[in-house]
Amino acid sequence: MSKKNLNTDFQEAVAFVSNYEFPIPADILLKLYAYYKVATKNFSNPGSKTPLINAFKANALIQAQNISIEDAMREYINLVEKELKPDGK
């Protein structure tokens, strides 16, 4: 996959998640959050008003901190395809 296709596929996956109409399990949301933050190089502090949610987000980000931007994009896309698009479309 070329870098251009990877960026396009990533943006499409992000748009899909943004418009997803069903509840997403918390473990999937945390992984998506971490991969998105790495892929977009946005390492700002979690913005929740709930300390426990911030702790979970920070932990997810720590777990994903050693992957490359491209790998984070691929993991995000793969997670969307596997968990949120059961028919693979």
Image: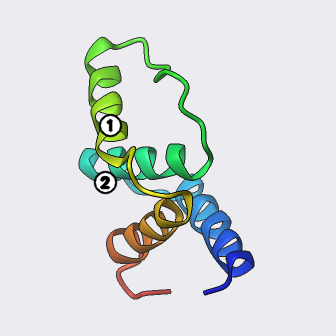
Up the image or down, 32 lies above or below 88; here it is above
In the picture, residue 50 is in which quadrant? top left
Q: How many marks?
A: 2
Front disc: 1 or 2 = 1
* Residue assigned mark 2: 28
- The tag on residue 62 is 1
Looking at the rendered structure, the kind of residue marked 2 is: Ile
Looking at the rendered structure, the kind of residue marked 1 is: Ile
Up the image or down, 38 lies above or below 14; here it is above
Residue depicted at x 40% and y 57%: 22
- Neighbours of disc 2 within 10 Å: few (<14), some (14-19), many (20+): some
Q: Is residue 22 left or right of residue 26?
A: right
Disc on the earlier residue, 1 or 2:
2
Up the image or down, 37 lies above or below 5; here it is above
x, y (%) of residue 47?
50, 20
Residue depicted at x 62% and y 47%: 40
x, y (%) of residue 85?
41, 77
